[in-house]
Every structure is written in C-alpha cells, then in structure tokens.
Amino acid sequence: MPVATPEQYADMLDRAKAGGFAYPAINVSSSQTINSVLQGLTEAGSDGIIQVTTGGADYFAGQTVKARATGALAFARYATEVAKNYPITVALHTDHCPKEALPNFVMPLIEASEEEVRAGRNPIFQSHMWDGSAVPLDENIEIAKDLLPRMKNINAILEVEIGVVGGEEDGVKHEGSNEALYTTVADVTKAVEALGLGEHGRYISALTFGNVHGVYKPGNVKLRPELLGEIQEGIAAKFGTGPKPLDLVFHGGSGSTEAEIALAVANGVVKMNIDTDTQYAFTRSIAGYMFSNYEGVLKLDGEVGNKKQYDPRAWGKVAETAMAARVVEATQQLGSAGQSLGA
C-alpha cells in the first residue's frame, strides 16, 4: 500500500489510542533496513512508522557528504516507492532534531513538503520531531509553538519532547540529574497552555518517565510508566477534557519489560521508538553468517572463496530477515500485530 496520507496517519494514531495499542517506530539508515521494517510489519499484519535521525539521514546521503536534508528526502522517496508493494500502511517520520539541526534538517524538509502541498500533493513526511530537551523548557515550547502552524498547514504532525531522555541517540547526548528524566504535570501544563490540545495543530508528546537511550542491564534504568497516567489525569482535570487527552510517545524503550511497555501503552502511548534492538538484530545475524561461512567469504590460502556466500545479497537477506523478526516481536509487545486495515 502507499505511504499513509495525512488522514490515514491521523486515523492510525486514533485507532491505536482507542484500541489500546501502539505502533513501533523503527529507525532506519539504509534501503536494507527499510526493507527489513516493511518485511517485519507485513509478517506481523501491522501498520507502523519508519523514521530517520540526523545521523541516519547523513548516511543516506553518502558517508562522505553529510547532506542530511538530501539524505532524508532520498529515504522518503525510496520508502514511498517500495512501500507500494506491501499490504500494510506506514508513515514516515524524522526523529530527534535538536536546535542546531533545525536549519539543515527539519526546516528544509518542511519547505519541501510545503512545495508538494501547494502543488496539490501530500507532504513528504507525515510527522517531524522537534527535540527541545537540551534547551530550557520555555525555549523548547516557544520553538514548538512556532513550528506547529507550519506543520498544520501541510497537514503533518509535530512530535515534541517535554523532559529529558538520558543516554545518547545518534550523537544527541543528554546528561543531567535523575529528576530531569521524569516529566512533571507542571511541565506538560505549560506546554499545553502554549500549544493547545489539537486546535492549533496536532502534536504527539514524548514525555519522560526514566527513559534512557541505548541498552542497559536489568535494574540499571528505573522506568515509571505509571507517571504517564498521572500526567494524563492531571491534564484532563486542568483542562476539562476526557480521559487520556495526550497522544504519547515512548523513547528509550530498549530492554523494557513487557509489563512496562503494556502499562505505558495503557496510559496513552501510541508510538514507541525502536532502534538499538533492531540494529543489534541486523548486525548480530551478519556476524553469525560470517563466522559460519568464513571460508567462503574469505579467499583463504590462495583460493577464490564462494561468490554465492560473499555476495552482499546473501548475507543481506539474512540480516533483513533477522531485523524483520525483531520488528514482529515489537508489534506483538505493542499490540499492533494483526491490527492493519490492509492485513
């Protein structure tokens, strides 16, 4: 199916919220990893979100070029074309754009979508993330407030981060007090007062409840997904809305328990970012392949090796299938498996 229209993407998020499930949002950095996501979502019968960071976009453009807007557009065009061959629906998203990257990442992409919309077509990306977690909260909200009308005009969704996710995500690193890793009702109230609750443009919120990017041994990260429910209740009471007024995003979820994921989803998470685990699944399978076939992939003792084994397509298929399996696992954890309208 084609990449989601803005209306289809909005419906995807609404169905997730109403149905008590969330979509995996998988970071990619190559055509192979795009194909892996599409394969996994199809095998699971799940719709989903494919996303690219600044570093991923740099890599798409060519490792020696560092032209991230070009790389992001190349990612979107490739994904848009190949997604037509799969029976599920995907949305395209840009992940973690800090302040210094706005001029050469998200802003050129918004401008490119504005041109598309003026020509009567859909935006290139269905959503963009503004990551203001490294700047003071007031500045974070002010930039989000400036971005939101432009996003609304292209019928796209803005993702904001209110709080700080620890660890490092593709060069975006946060170090601070443990208290900063837990968003407060007061923080979110200030954001809602500035951004509204959809009337000025739709946005989704990455609130933090102890999240840390990367992978850690059990017990090293203290997640409090119940905090999301407390914030939802506080905002509902403050602004007189129905239950769970916010559409939430789960960042830094690698290594989370099924119970933690389930509680986060029950409290309004509709999108969960996945990067570390799928990277590992992809690369671990290649390592296993190479160790198992080293005589074929290396020209030992003057021999010629086995072209069928060192052909990049041979180990590439293994890697894509391994990553696809991890995507399937994510859809099962999040409850989106079998929920695709096209499945």
Image (spheres, rainbow, N blue to C red):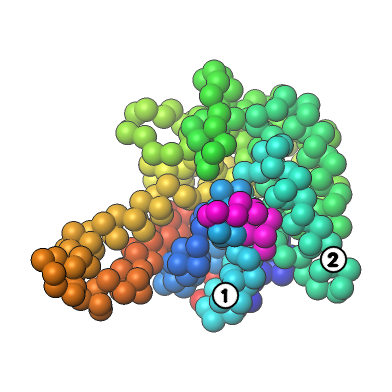
Magenta stretch, residue numbers? 63-73
The residue to which callout 2 is attached is 115
**Residue 123 position within the rendered picture, expressed as x and y whole percent measured from the top left:** 76, 65
Q: Residue at x 42, y 60 (%)?
A: 327
| Residue 142 visible in rendering | yes
Looking at the picture, tell me which residue is in the foreground, 333 or 217.
Answer: 217
Q: Secondary structure at mark 2?
A: helix
Q: Amino acid at mark 1?
A: Ala
Q: Residue at x 34, y 64 (%)?
A: 319
Q: Which numbered disc flags the more N-terminal residue, 1 or 2? A: 1
Please give the label number shown on residue 83: 1
For mark 2, does the 10 Å Cα neighbourhood hold few (<14), some (14 to 19), or many (20 or more) residues?
some
Amino acid at pointer 2:
Glu
Secondary structure at badge 1 equals: helix
Q: Is residue 64 magenta?
A: yes
Q: Position of residue 115 (x, y in %)?
A: 84, 66
Residue furthest to the left: 301
Drawn side of residue 272 relative to residue 17, left or right? left
